[in-house]
Amino acid sequence: MPVYVSNEQDKVYVGKDLIKHLEKLGFFVLDGQGLGVREAGIILVDDEEIRRLNREYRGIDSPTDVLSFALNEGEEVEGADFLLGDVYISMERAVAQAEEYGHSLLREVSFLAVHGLLHLLGYDHQTEEERQRMRQKEEEILEEFGLPR
């Protein structure tokens, strides 16, 4: 499977079903772009680790919900058969946000995974137009996968 999921935290229970779900969702996202076989990693971490990554790579000393690290940052994604990069998701942030937004943890982690994978594929949200385009794509993918808002 082209999406590898690793649970690197122990603060939020993550069962095999969630791991398999994220692998299938990741494959669905990558395969649905019509770009050929791609690989990516999804790493589930705690707030402490994502804060460290956010501080080290973005200069922001606070936890965040999701970070993406593309191997070919700024390059157009063409062709097939290569590693796109890794997506880090804070499970503690996901739990808090699921509660805040009034939906399931599965929906929140799925949203964060899709968001991160789209970043690896070149989507961004620096402008309002980019933000709207990315949000629309996120919701389309989640709805097609059976996780509507």
Image (tube, rainbow, N blue to C red):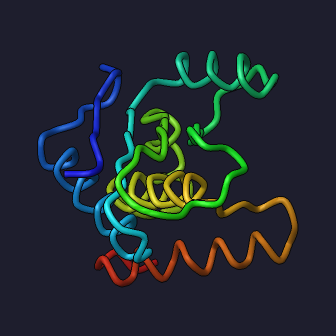
Q: Residue 21 lies in what quarter of the image? A: bottom left
* Residue 107, image x, y percentages: 38, 62
Is residue 68 something one can see in this rendering? no
Looking at the image, residue 140 sits to the left or right of residue 44; the answer is right
Residue in the picture at 35% in, 83% down: 144
Residue in the picture at 43% in, 27% down: 45
- In the image, residue 135 sits, relative to residue 111, either above or below, namely below
* Residue 66, image x, y percentages: 56, 42
Q: Closer to the camera, 49 or 69?
A: 69
Q: Closer to the camera, 12 or 73?
A: 73
Residue in the picture at 87% in, 66% down: 127
Q: Closer to the camera, 98 or 134?
A: 134
Looking at the image, residue 108 sits to the left or right of residue 115; the answer is left
Q: Residue 142 lies in what quarter of the image? A: bottom left
Query: In the current view of this chain or complex, which residue is farthest to the left?
Result: 16
Q: Residue 4 lies in what quarter of the image? A: top left
* Residue 76, image x, y percentages: 65, 60
Badge count: 0
Query: In the current view of this chain or complex, which residue is farthest to the front?
Result: 79
- In the image, residue 146 sits, relative to residue 66, either above or below, namely below
- In the image, residue 46 sits, relative to residue 129, either above or below, namely above
Is residue 73 something one can see in this rendering? yes
* Residue 31, image x, y percentages: 33, 70
Looking at the image, residue 142 sits to the left or right of residue 24; the answer is right
Q: Closer to the camera, 59 or 80?
A: 80
Residue in the picture at 76% in, 62% down: 125
